[in-house]
Amino acid sequence: MSAGSTSSLTGNRVVFRAGSGTVDTAAKTATIRWKGSFTSVFYGGLTYWSATDPTLTVKADGTGTLTATASGYGADMNDPGKWAPLPETTVTLANLSGVEVGASGFTVTPDYLGVSVSVPAGATGQPAKSEGNKGYWGSFPQSFVDFQQLTGQSSYWFTSGGARDAAKPASPLTVAYTAAGTDSGPAEGEQTITATVPEQAGEFTWTIDASDRAVTLTDAVNKGAYLHSTGDLKPVKVTDTRAGAPAWSVSGQVGDFTGGLSGKYLGWTPQVLTAGAGAQPGTAVASGIDNGDGLTASATLGSATTGHAKGTGTLGAALDLRLPATTEAGTYTTTLTLTALS
């Protein structure tokens, strides 16, 4: 990143999945909880904090909150000797307005613009809104900023008069979910939920046909040294019409199959099914039956470089599953998680 450029971004984002909760599309309400943590590291580890077990709540009036348990160390980027563990604290990561709870999810930009914040005396404060800063003047939630006072990162989460102020407003939050008991595969009594916080805003979208997300591979054929099964990934449509045409990528990663069968046995050969949006296929990943991690390590399905043509392209991949010849007969299932960065 460059401190002198407000368009210089890390490309990092946070993705939680396998959450659970309730969604009432008629009442326009939702409560969803995830298990897990992420850590934000600044200045090569001189300051950092973590958020654990986030909870999303949406009310009927379209307002909502995303909360989590924050922890970390009290630090000062100007004083490497300051390093004290902080007590776990419940904070609001995002306040939401105008949420439209849909059948399969929603996307909303957290409140930031126009939000005021107070800080302790002597700390870097929020300057008054002016003609020069009104386009990006605002703040993350008060409880979150209060916690960041202890980590040494406070002024990075609100307009503080610095050169990077224009890069601080919150990016969109995306929540996707599938109701338990539908034909898309969740086991009875469970939901699969993916929450995505992109690094940047803009007209970049990627979609998979919601009614056709299950891939069935061919019956495994005995090749002597291994059992071989193949199939095709469901098409992934990518549309990018953003000004400046920044780079983008879509990657995939699988977990282990049911029954304890390692996901490393699955590989793929990415393809561009329909040219557009500058799409280029990722590098083929071999099955890890002999060596390597297969698709248990994140691998690029497709990408485009900065300055690519605007438009829509479709990505796909030929799947290659090679199992040990001693694998017991049965049906095995795994989940492929696709992630987009742009």
Image: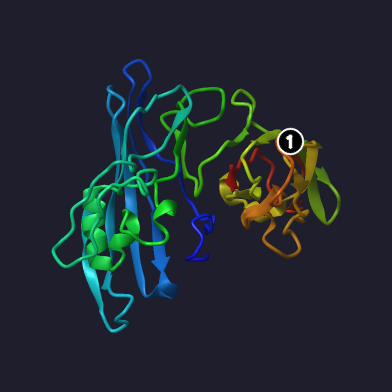
Q: How crowded is the residue under tag 1: few (<14 C-alpha within 10 Å), some, or many (20+)?
A: many
**Horizontal arrangement in the rendering, residue 167 relative to residue 145 (left or right):** right
**Horizontal arrangement in the rendering, residue 301 relative to residue 57 (left or right):** right
Q: Identify the residue at image location x=31%, y=17%.
A: 27
Pointer 1: what residue?
Answer: 313
Q: Nearer the viewer, residue 92 or 159?
A: 159
Q: Can residue 219 be seen? A: no
The image position of residue 25, as x and y in percent, is: 38, 19
The image position of residue 126, as x and y in percent, is: 25, 55
**Horizontal arrangement in the rendering, residue 308 relative to residue 198 (left or right):** right
Above or below, comparing residue 38 to residue 280 in the picture: below
- Secondary element at tag 1: strand
Above or below, comparing residue 96 to residue 297 in the picture: above
Give, as a three-letter code, the residue at label 1.
Gly
Q: Nearer the viewer, residue 119 or 212?
A: 119
Q: Identify the residue at image location x=41%, y=29%.
A: 189
Q: Identify the residue at image location x=16%, y=68%.
A: 122
